[in-house]
Structure formats: C-alpha cells, structure tokens
Image (cartoon, helix red, strand yellow):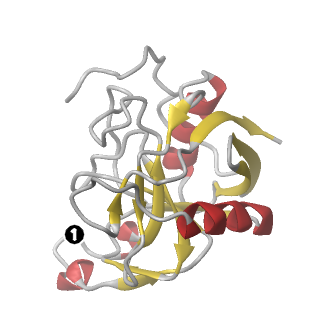
C-alpha cells in the first residue's frame, strides 16, 4: 500500500449507515460547478470515504489528471493529489455496487457493461483497491462491472464536463484520446449541500 499523498485521517469504520440513501454534494472546479448526488444506499463505504476525504479538504486544489475521449471510454478522472494516477489516501477498501451483485468468480465480471452518462464511479487498480481516485462519465462508456458506482452528476455538471471534453486531451500525451485534459481542471472544493 502506498503512503498517503496528503495527510488524512481514516474514515469511520465498522457498520456504516445507509440512511439517508442519497446525499447531495457540490464539486467546485475552475472550469465550472459539478453537482453530485452520492448513492449512500448502494455504496455506503465508498460514500463514507468520499465524504470523509472531502470534509478533510483532501480534494481541495487538486488536478483532474486524466481525460479519455474514446467512444468506448469517455471520462474525467480526479481525486489524485499527485496528479499522475498513482496517488491515494494511504488506505484501500472493497468494491461495492455493481461488483457486489456478482459472485466473486463470475466470468460476467469481465464482460463490459454500460456506465451511463452522468455516472460517478471509483477508479481502481484491481479488485478492492479503491482509494481516493474517481471518474465522472460524460458519455455512455463500456467497462467491466468492476468499478464502484457511488453517485450521479447533475445537468450543470454535465455541461461543465462537456466543455472540458470538447477541449480534448493535451498534446504530448501517450495517446490522442487518453491523457491530461487540454483545459486544466482544478477542484477548488467538494462540500456537502
């Protein structure tokens, strides 16, 4: 396990409440606002961690380091204070919905499903390696059901994401459709509404 990219207290542990089922949050960026509805009913551990990190200012003044513009994967990835795809909070936790809807060795876990436009999900480096990185889906994307969905994005947020996506990937990346966004995106804060 990697050390924390920023000092952080661990989120509460043990049985996490699923009430309220949904929690509203605002992600302010220098490219515009992104309103979030966190799905505490389906992904309580993920929401617990995300809220804990947000309340500690973990995401404040961090870059969204990755934009993908391929037809099958259209996301903006954020939540890494190191801004290189390797950073995290120094702890990891298990996948939740939709992964937990399948038996552990189910071959269907390898088959792509649609993560619809407006989905908020955790990025990971394999099973049960969730930390702080998350992605925002701005166009229906195909991924195996191994990424925890923990919320949705409001219309104003989708407009912000569309603007960022229209700017494309910064030149000099390894691929024309995957790399840092040409329009730099800094999260100024994430707070509960």
Label 1 secondary element: loop
Measured as percent of width and height from the top left, residue 163 is found at 65, 64
Measured as percent of width and height from the top left, residue 133 is found at 42, 45
* Residue at x 73%, y 57% (from the top left corner): 22
Q: Is residue 5 above or below residue 80?
A: above
Tell me the quarter of the picture where residue 54 sits.
Answer: top right
Q: Residues within 10 Å of mark 1 (few under 14, many from 20)?
A: few
Whether residue 9 appears in this view of the structure is yes
* Residue at x 61%, y 38% (from the top left corner): 187
Image quarter (top left, top right, bottom left or bottom right) of the N terminus: top left
Q: Is residue 127 above or below residue 79?
A: below
Tell me the quarter of the picture where residue 101 sits.
Answer: bottom left
Between 140 and 43, the residue placed more toward the observer is: 140
**Which residue position is annotated with label 1?**
104
Q: Is residue 4 above or below residue 166?
A: above
Q: Name the side, left or right, on which 181 lies relative to 88.
A: right
Image quarter (top left, top right, bottom left or bottom right) of the C terminus: top right
Question: What count of labels does the image hold?
Answer: 1
Q: Name the side, left or right, on which 123 lies relative to 117.
A: left
* Residue at x 43%, y 29% (from the top left corner): 81
Residue at the extreme right of the image, as rendered: 193
Q: Is residue 60 above or below residue 50?
A: above
Residue at the extreme top of the image, as rendered: 7
Whether residue 97 appears in this view of the structure is no
Measured as percent of width and height from the top left, residue 57 is found at 61, 23
Measured as percent of width and height from the top left, residue 162 is found at 63, 69
Q: Name the side, left or right, on which 180 lies relative to 125.
A: right
């Amino acid at each position: 396990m990697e050390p924390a990219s920023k000092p952080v207290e661990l989120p509460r542990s043990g049985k996490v409440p699923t009430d309220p089922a949904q929690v509203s949050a605002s992600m302010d960026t220098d490219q515009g606002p992104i309103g979030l509805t966190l799905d505490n009913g389906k992904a309580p551990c993920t929401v617990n961690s995300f809220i804990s990190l947000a309340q500690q200012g973990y995401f404040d003044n961090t870059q969204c380091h990755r934009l993908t513009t391929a037809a099958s994967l259209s996301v903006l990835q954020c939540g890494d204070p190191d801004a290189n795809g390797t950073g995290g909070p120094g702890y990891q936790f298990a996948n939740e919905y939709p992964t937990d809807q399948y038996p552990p060795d189910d071959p269907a876990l390898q088959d792509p499903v649609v993560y619809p436009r407006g989905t908020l999900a955790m990025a990971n480096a394999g099973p049960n390696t969730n930390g702080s990185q998350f992605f925002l889906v701005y166009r229906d994307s195909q991924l195996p059901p191994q990424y925890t969905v923990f919320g949705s994005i409001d219309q104003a947020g989708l407009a912000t994401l569309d603007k960022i996506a229209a700017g494309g990937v910064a030149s000099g990346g390894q691929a024309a459709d995957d790399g840092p966004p040409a329009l730099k995106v800094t999260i100024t804060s994430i707070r509960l509404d």
